[in-house]
Image (tube, grey):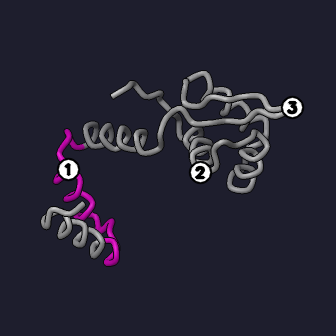
Amino acid sequence: MKKLPQISEAEYEVMKVIWEAAPVSTNEVTDKLVQSTDWSPKTIQTLLKRLVQKGAVSYRKESRVFVYTPLVKQTEYLEHENSHFLQRFYNGNFASMLTSYLDNDSFTEKELDELRELLKQREGGSR
């Protein structure tokens, strides 16, 4: 697996917009994030520049607008982050993580039903 860039929480919020709408202009990213955060347009532009420097996104200039495209797939990034989280906090032991969540009542009954259904599907060999 290729080495993925480290992305901060704020940069991740920008990445979510890019993953959802790519290719996406600076203005579109800014409009979306100004609605959901208290960030200024300048802050958002700085985060976009950081993501370019880290190799997480590329851009092209169209007329007077920059258009961004992700270089990292969302699924790939999330798999990496989940694996890192599991290793860091639970020594790679998924059962320990799940037990911790269950012990702290972190799941709703609906989520438990969904988890049961996923486990049934895995047992049956379907994915």
Q: Quadrant of residue 68?
A: top right
Q: Which residues are magenta?
A: 90-111
Element type at mark 3: loop
Judge from the rendering whether residue 27 lies leftward or rightward of residue 5; answer left or right. right
The amino acid beneath tag 3 is Arg
Quarter the N terminus occupies: top left
Q: Which mark is residue 8?
A: none
Rendering coords of residue 104 (x, y %): 28, 64
Query: Which residue corresponds to the image point at 29% horizontal and 68% vertical from the top-left?
Result: 105
Left or right of 73 on screen, residue 120:
left
124 to the left or right of 20? left
Q: Position of residue 10 (x, y in %)?
A: 59, 40
Residue on which disc 3 sits: 64
Q: Residue at x 72, y 28 (%)?
A: 60
Magenta portion: prevailing SS class: helix
Residue at x-position 70% and y-position 43%:
24
Residue position marked by numbered label 1 in the rendering: 94
Depth check, mark 1 against mark 3: the one in front is: 3
Q: Earlier in the sequence, mark 2 or mark 3?
A: 2
Q: Secondary structure at mark 1?
A: helix
Residue 40 at x, y percent in the picture: 78, 42
**Where is mark 2, residue-wise?**
20
Looking at the image, residue 59 lies above or below residue 44 = above
Q: CA distance from mark 1 to mark 3?
A: 48 Å
- 16 within the magenta span: no
Q: Amino acid at mark 2?
A: Glu
Q: Amino acid at mark 1?
A: Phe
Mark 3 neighbour density, 10 Å: few (under 14) some (14–19) many (20 or more): few
Cα gap from disc 2 to disc 1, whole angstroms: 29 Å
Separation of residues labelled 2 and 3 (CA atoms)? 23 Å
Nearer to me, 110 or 89:
110
Tell me the quadrant of the picture where the C terminus can be found.
bottom left
